[in-house]
Image: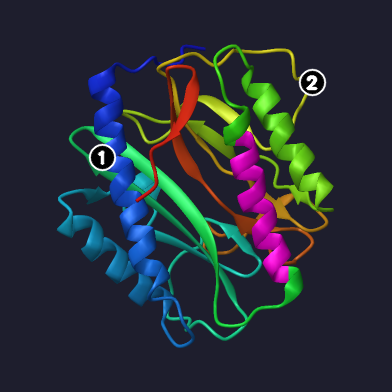
Amino acid sequence: MAIALRKKDEIEKLRRAGAIVAQTLEFLKEKIEPGITLKEIDRLGEEFIRSKGATPSFKGLYGFPASVCTSVNEVIIHGVPTDYALKEGDIIGLDIGTFLDGYYGDGAVTLEVGEVSKEDKRLIECSKDALYRAIDAIKPGVRFKEISKVLEDTIREYGYVPLREFCGHGIGTKPHDEPNIPNYVDGKPKQGPKIKNGMVFCIEPMVCQKSGEPKILEDKWSVVSRDGLKGSHYEHQVAVVDGKAIILTQP
């Protein structure tokens, strides 16, 4: 497995692509309210990305039909925008990719629609907390499996389980590259490749309530848990620079 080590100028290009992801998510956060449709969110997101000089990298990627993954309630990732209008009490995951000057950006958040239950607030907090704990653990010499263990331990500490078969990933001149970074550990954490300065990758905890076994819906994209319950998802793109993780997908 060859994990790319990026030079300073490459990381700067990845930072610019990531910044547009963050700006788009911030823009869309202000639009999330009861009544807006998923297709409208997708349209607004695509227009905003293009207004910044970037291309929405998800559109057409592996055949995906839209620019923004809109994952509502029990859909954890890869939700396809439809005419569904958001309702009070929904939760929605927004996952966005950009392509700028040959490099990719990628990030995601899960948001509340109006007032949501305490249980849903906690579900969202779990994925966000797991993400930032994992980022805090990133430094050269740490193994990727150790980061996966931080993610799994945090998710289980909340009483939830990680979604299986889907994972974080390397990113650069490809939208998905080595390494794969699951939100759970198979085998021993002290095995496998180590993190090095210059690596750039996405950490993205995907949280289920009772079952981590995925099920893909009839649209061939939307991923739910076999428990049929709500899930949550957060993602940042990070670069390892001077011994620490720098978040590339923030405003």
Label 1 vs 2, first from the N-terminus: 1
Viewer-proximal residue, 34 or 70? 34
- What residue would you read off at disc 1? 16
Question: Which tag is nearer the camera, tag 1 or tag 2?
Answer: 1
Placement of 232 over or under 189, stated as above or below: below
How crowded pointer 1 is (Cα within 10 Å; few <14, some 14-19, many 20+) is rated as many
> Which element is circle 1 on?
helix
- Amino acid type of the residue tagged 1 in the rendering: Arg
> Which element is circle 2 on?
loop
Residue 115 x, y percent position in the rendering: 61, 82
Can the viewer see residue 135? Answer: yes
Q: What residue is rendered at 18% in x and 57% in y?
A: 50
- Amino acid type of the residue tagged 2 in the rendering: Gly
Residue 132 x, y percent position in the rendering: 59, 42
Q: Which secondary structure class fits the magenta region best?
A: helix
Placement of 208 over or under 175, stated as above or below: below
Taking the image as shown, residue 226 lies to the left or right of residue 21, namely right
